[in-house]
């Protein structure tokens, strides 16, 4: 157990150190990329399309946007990187005997570490100059719910991507669909009643809602909505892990 924890910490450290190795901006790109996206979305949706934040939120649209966009970018990064966690480390899988599942966990953790860093910067700036207010319980629940949501799909995608290389090309478009169906650029009140079912069927809504509640003090999603999804994701995490372990024996041959 101690050996696995040490190996996991080394894999996370290695992933974080090589992610921006050789680039001029280095690790600052982890913060610059969300800021560039946020600036673009703020320009389009607050000045051109003119989407307003919820009426009971006293902050700016940019704060409302960032509080939802940063968790989404962390979730997106975690899924994309975990899907290629095994194929990107094929040299390790073929030459070494170790728990290959740690590659997937390391990809998830490194994405969440970068997300946490971005959220800390946002919380400091929003708390100092905006309407931000930190609530630790929703933030902790947000990270736990997000990790549980990611676990099953991450293991399943990592295993499936080894056998079906075209899967990596489908993840981006599918995530784009989920992004626009999630109330990140717009408040939930902007969704027409006829499309309320789409919100109820989208668990990422709960992730965004918990982080916004923890960062800018909006109303947190009710536990009656979060807990059933958490139970579903616990089952999916178990099934995703089982699928990964069953497929693991063929990794070296396919890679």
Image: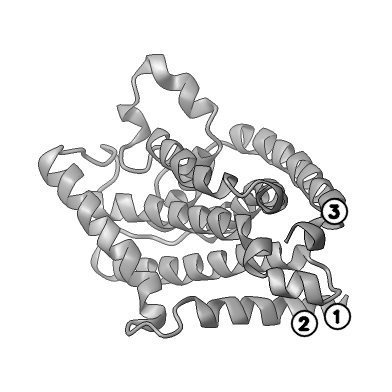
On screen, residue 230 above or below 121: above
Residue at 20% across, 43% down: 45
Say above or below: 46 vs 31: above
Q: Are the residues flagged by discs 3 and 2 in contact, CB closer than 8 Å?
A: no
Scheme by which the image is coloured: one colour
Left or right of 113 in this view: 98: right
Secondary structure category for the residue under label 3: helix
Classify mark 3: residues with Cα within 10 Å, few (<14), some (14-19) or many (20+). some
Camera-nearest label, 3 or 2: 3
Q: Is residue 241 visible?
A: yes
Instruction: Tell me if residue 93 comes above or below residue 218 in the rendering.
Output: below
Q: Are marks 1 and 2 in contact (CB under 8 Å)?
A: yes
Q: Is residue 127 shown to the viewer in this render?
A: no
Estimate how packed mark 2 is, as few (under 14), some (14 to 19) or many (20 or more) residues with alpha carbons within 10 Å. Answer: few
Residue hosting label 2: 6
What is the residue that sits farthest to the left in this orientation?
A: 48
Label 3 vs label 2: CA separation? 21 Å
Residue 225 in the image, given as x and y percentages of width and height: 60, 33
Rounded to the nearest angstrom, the CA distance separating label 3 from label 1 is: 21 Å
- Front residue of 217 and 107: 107
Circle 3 residue: 245
Q: Percent position (x, y) of residue 149?
A: 63, 46
| Quarter of the view holding residue 110 | bottom right
Query: Mark number for residue 2?
Result: 1
Residue closer to the observer: 1 or 220: 1
């Amino acid at each position: 157990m101690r050996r696995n924890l040490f190996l996991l910490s080394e894999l996370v450290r290695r992933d974080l150190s090589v992610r921006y190795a050789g680039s001029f901006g280095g690790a600052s790109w982890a913060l610059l990329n969300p800021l560039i996206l946020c600036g673009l979305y703020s320009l389009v949706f607050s000045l051109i399309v003119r989407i307003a934040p919820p009426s009971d939120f006293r902050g700016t649209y940019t704060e409302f946007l960032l509080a939802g966009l940063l968790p989404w970018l962390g979730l997106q990064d975690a899924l994309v990187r975990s899907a290629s966690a095994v194929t990107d480390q094929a040299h390790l899988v073929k030459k070494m005997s170790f728990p290959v599942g740690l590659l997937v966990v390391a990809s998830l953790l490194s994405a969440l570490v970068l997300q946490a860093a971005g959220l800390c910067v946002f919380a400091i700036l929003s708390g100092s100059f905006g309407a931000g207010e930190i609530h630790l319980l929703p933030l902790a629940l947000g990270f736990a719910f997000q990790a549980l949501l990611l676990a099953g799909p991450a293991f399943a995608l990592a295993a499936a991507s080894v056998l079906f290389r075209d899967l990596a090309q489908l993840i981006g478009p599918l995530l784009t669909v989920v992004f626009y169906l999630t109330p990140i650029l717009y408040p939930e009140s902007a969704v027409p009643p006829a499309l309320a079912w789409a919100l109820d069927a989208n668990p990422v809504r709960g992730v965004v809602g918990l982080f916004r509640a923890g960062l800018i003090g909006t109303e947190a999603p009710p536990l009656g909505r979060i807990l059933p999804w958490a139970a579903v994701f616990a089952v999916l995490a178990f099934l995703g892990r089982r699928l990964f372990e069953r497929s693991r024996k063929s990794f070296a041959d396919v890679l």
